[in-house]
């Protein structure tokens, strides 16, 4: 759907399947043109915890599913080590199209700009409103600054649980009690030099265990 204003137009009343179908035609920013497809979130509508990343990567763009590439496999392992049931989790991204530049045979990741985040924000808000999770975990700086404000810094504020009063269905808003926190993106762990990677992975798992504790 194209609002003509650089912001996605989200159906007023629909379920996750309806949101996914509508998002597949989103033209609110230019990223839909080079990307293979929209990559919407995945998981149950009654998920207790939502993980929000930056954007789909190369593998995700080709397959049309979030967190199915190397970073997704690392996240799955970290969730298991942290004691978080993947079946009660929903995974999505702040931006639903892959932003990249050509690099020979490879497509090189490019961080989405604020205009892309703003264009896609209605989809994320709609997902969170429908799911109304107990805990939201921001994976990486883009997601954290989108949901926690531009002053948020992963390096100094990761792993801290904060009250969350984000978008929710009107009938649930008054009774809602939820948490939000941020940690590093799994792809950042993969970029750490090999000898330092175990410590970076352990730090991610430690943060996820804090989120698991909030679910208890």
Image (cartoon, rainbow, N blue to C red):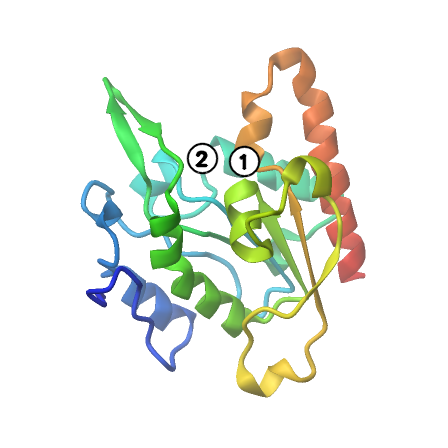
Q: Name the residue under label 1.
A: 73
Pinpoint residue 165: horizontal percent, then vertical percent.
Answer: 64, 70
Residue at the far bottom in the pictured view: 171
- The number of numbered discs placed on residues in the rendered structure image is 2
Q: Is 206 on the left-hand or right-hand side of 119?
A: right
Question: Circle 2: is it few (<14), some (14-19), or many (20+) Cα within 10 Å?
Answer: some
Pinpoint residue 108: horizontal percent, then vertical percent.
Answer: 33, 26
Pinpoint residue 158: horizontal percent, then vertical percent.
Answer: 70, 42
Q: Can residue 47 be seen in this view?
A: yes
- The relative height of residue 8 versus residue 202 in the rendered view (above or below) is below
Q: Distance between the residues labelled 1 and 2?
A: 6 Å
Residue at (40, 52) in percent of width and height: 117
Q: Name the residue under label 2.
A: 69
Pinpoint residue 163: horizontal percent, then vertical percent.
Answer: 72, 64
Q: What element carries label 1?
A: helix
Residue at (45, 52) in percent of width and height: 94
Q: What element carries label 2?
A: loop
Quadrant position of the N terminus in the picture: bottom left
Question: Circle 1: is it few (<14), some (14-19), or many (20+) Cα within 10 Å?
Answer: few
Q: Is residue 90 visible?
A: no
**Res. 162 image quadrant:** bottom right
């Amino acid at each position: 759907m194209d609002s003509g204003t650089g912001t996605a137009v989200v159906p007023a009343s629909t379920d996750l399947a309806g949101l996914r179908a509508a998002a597949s035609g989103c033209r609110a920013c230019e990223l839909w043109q080079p990307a293979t497809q929209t990559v919407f979130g995945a998981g149950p509508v009654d998920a207790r915890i939502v993980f929000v990343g930056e954007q789909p990567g190369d593998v995700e763009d080709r397959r049309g599913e979030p967190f199915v590439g190397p970073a997704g496999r690392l996240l799955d392992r970290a969730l298991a080590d942290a004691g978080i049931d993947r079946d009660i989790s929903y995974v999505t991204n702040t931006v639903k199209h892959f932003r990249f530049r050509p690099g020979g045979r490879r497509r090189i990741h490019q961080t989405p700009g604020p205009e892309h985040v703003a264009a896609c924000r209605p989809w994320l808000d709609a997902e969170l409103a429908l799911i109304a999770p107990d805990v939201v975990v921001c994976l990486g700086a883009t997601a954290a600054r989108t949901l926690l404000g531009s002053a948020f810094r992963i390096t100094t504020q990761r792993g801290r649980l904060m009250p969350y009063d984000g978008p929710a269905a009107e009938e649930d808003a008054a009774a809602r009690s939820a948490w939000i926190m941020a940690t590093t993106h799994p792809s950042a762990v993969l970029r750490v030099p090999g000898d330092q990677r175990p410590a970076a992975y352990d730090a991610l798992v430690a943060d996820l265990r804090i989120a698991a504790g909030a679910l208890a």
